[in-house]
Image: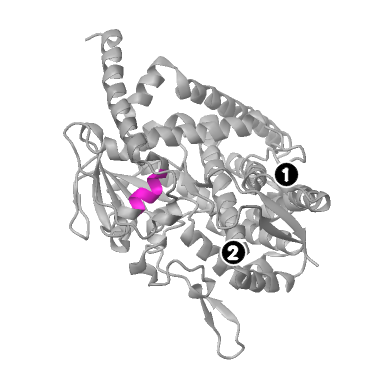
């Protein structure tokens, strides 16, 4: 059939499915139920139907997708979800299976064509969604740069400048005027966006100015990330593919966002090339990632643009999400706040790297916060060939396989009966001689917040450096007090990264 004839028929078919699924959603959703209140529920593996799979249940739970799957994984540590048109997705919260996916049989489990189709328009061939030789090459050159002391010093300089010149003055003004900041999460997202753009591109989007402007580049990046995530998690992917073909709805906005992001990125790359040619003697300590790649001889505009955009995506919302939940948990647990504050005030105001590294209790508290509220709740791979997982689950070529970080952080099998407690001490041991805390890491396949195996996060050290400097800089002067009604819990949700749904309003109080 001709495309003009086939497209309306497909659209009609998928619209009917979507209508029926949405009707199911309206009937089954309970507005009084929150993700936090579902921690004790037992949810059955959804029943599949011919052709449409479990699309009704998937759509009915789309507003709480992360929590729905986590509920199922409490009783079935690995299960197979049937999607529409014969597609399958395996979810797991089993550390042995995670190790198999991320290390033991690493060649089988790649990012895969499904992810590349969904987010490739936005990210290109960057390291975030690259596979095979392309990924190995990008990993090799990126790993070299991330392990240099000069990059670490550059990151410190950027973070400290953004902290002292932008974040602290905004908090100070809110404290002085006794005003409520309507969304602390937004403030932190602006902070990390400025940081990562300067670290990656050497470009300052000026997103965290006192006026809190809505910049075109930041808005385009946010829309591109959100729509790409919606593509990837779509219950019926054919819908977005038809919208893409017809250039309507969110797909039209995605094209506009891609043009904005990649247009500015290309302009920055060209200007950076000219600058480095005119000033080849630039000191490494003052060089962003883009400059480092260009100086290393990687001058292809699309290649460096793709890789740097991937780093912006990886570093933009993950750090801000972790910090938002961290400050929320500190407010709920004053004894933990006292320990962190004691550690912070015992350091010099101008923190150097070694002092940040010695913030052991703060490090443990950040790890514990990310256990309960991971910045990336689910990570998905795609099987390159047939396989059998360690628990006996059969995986066919082309199936998506996802390890559920959020469910694993709340697993009694992994963390014990006190898994629901925010307890940094579970990461620490006391040294008998002097009584100091010593950080004790856990098996990365039981705590895959930063992934594990060959694809372990390159920016892990950079992320902790940024978070500790923010925690020290803010807590030394201010107390962050969530402005929420008593008994109200923020709702954990996610696109590619996690969010506090609706934001987190706070009051800023000066420490006396």
Q: Eyeballing the image, is 417 above or below 224?
A: below
* Highlighted magenta segment, given as a residue range: 64-70
Label 2 crowd bin: few (<14), some (14–19), many (20+), radius 10 Å: some
Q: Eyeballing the image, is 458 above or below 312?
A: below
In the picture as drawn, the residue positioned furthest to the right comes out as 176
Determine whether the residue tagged by mark 2 lies in a helix, strand or loop.
helix
In the picture as drawn, the residue positioned furthest to the bottom comes out as 433
Give the quadrant of the C terminus: bottom right
Pinpoint residue 149: horizontal percent, then vertical percent: 63, 59
Taking depth in this image into account, of 220 and 500 the one nearest to the observer is 500
Q: Can residue 358 be seen from the camera position used here?
A: no
Q: How far apart are marks 1 and 2 (CA)?
A: 51 Å
Pinpoint residue 305: horizontal percent, then vertical percent: 55, 34
Give the quadrant of the N terminus: top left
Q: Quadrant of residue 97?
A: bottom left
Which residue was labeled with disc 2? 332
Q: Eyeballing the image, is 275 above or below 79?
A: above
Report the number of numbered marks: 2
Label 1 crowd bin: few (<14), some (14–19), many (20+), radius 10 Å: few
- For the point 56% across and 56% down, the residue is 325
* Residue 386 in the figure: left or right of residue 357: left
Which residue was labeled with disc 1? 281
- For the point 32% across and 26% down, the residue is 19
């Amino acid at each position: 059939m001709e495309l003009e004839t086939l497209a309306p028929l497909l659209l009609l078919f998928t619209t009917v499915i979507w209508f029926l699924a949405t009707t199911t959603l309206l009937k089954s959703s309970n507005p009084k139920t929150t993700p936090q209140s579902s921690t004790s529920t037992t949810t059955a593996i959804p029943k599949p139907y011919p052709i449409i799979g479990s699309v009704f249940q998937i759509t009915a739970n789309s507003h709480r997708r992360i929590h729905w799957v986590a509920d199922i994984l409490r009783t079935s540590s690995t299960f197979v979800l049937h999607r529409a048109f014969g597609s399958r997705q395996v979810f797991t919260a089993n550390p042995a299976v995670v190790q198999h996916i991320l290390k033991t049989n690493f060649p089988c489990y790649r990012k895969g064509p499904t992810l590349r189709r969904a987010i490739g328009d936005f990210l290109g061939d960057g390291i975030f969604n690259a596979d095979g030789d392309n990924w190995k090459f990008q990993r090799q050159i990126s790993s070299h740069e991330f392990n240099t002391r000069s990059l670490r010093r550059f990151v410190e300089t950027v973070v400290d400048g953004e902290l002292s010149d932008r974040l602290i003055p905004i908090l100070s003004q809110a404290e002085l005027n006794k005003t409520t900041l309507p969304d602390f999460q937004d403030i932190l997202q602006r902070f990390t966006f400025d940081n990562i753009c300067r670290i990656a591109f050497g470009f300052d989007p000026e997103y965290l100015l006192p006026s809190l402007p809505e910049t075109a580049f930041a808005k385009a990046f946010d829309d591109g990330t959100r729509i790409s995530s919606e593509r990837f998690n779509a219950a019926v992917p054919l819908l977005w593919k038809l919208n893409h073909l017809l250039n309507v709805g969110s797909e039209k906005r995605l094209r506009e966002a891609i043009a904005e992001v990649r247009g500015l990125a290309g302009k920055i790359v060209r200007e950076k090339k000219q600058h480095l040619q005119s000033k080849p003697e630039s000191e490494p300590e003052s060089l962003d990632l883009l400059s480092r790649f260009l100086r290393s001889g990687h001058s292809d505009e699309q290649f460096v643009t793709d890789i740097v955009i991937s780093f912006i995506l990886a570093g933009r919302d993950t750090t801000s999400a972790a910090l938002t939940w961290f400050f929320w948990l500190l407010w709920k647990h004053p004894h933990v706040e006292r320990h962190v504050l004691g550690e912070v005030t015992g350091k010099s105001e101008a923190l150097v790297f070694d002092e940040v590294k010695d913030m052991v209790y703060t490090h443990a508290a950040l790890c514990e916060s990310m256990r309960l509220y991971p910045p990336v709740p689910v990570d998905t791979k795609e099987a390159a060939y047939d396989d059998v997982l360690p628990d006996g689950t059969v995986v066919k070529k082309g199936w998506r396989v996802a390890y559920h970080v959020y469910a694993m952080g709340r697993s009694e099998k992994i963390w014990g009966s006190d898994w629901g407690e925010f307890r940094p001490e579970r990461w620490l041991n006391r040294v008998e001689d002097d009584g100091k805390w010593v950080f004790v890491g856990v098996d990365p396949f039981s705590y895959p917040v930063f992934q594990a195996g060959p694809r372990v996060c390159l920016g892990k050290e950079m992320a902790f450096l940024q978070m500790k400097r923010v925690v020290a800089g803010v807590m030394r002067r201010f107390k962050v007090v969530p402005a929420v009604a008593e008994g109200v819990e923020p709702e954990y949700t996610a696109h590619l990264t996690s969010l506090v749904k609706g934001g987190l309003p706070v009051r800023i109080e000066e420490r006396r």
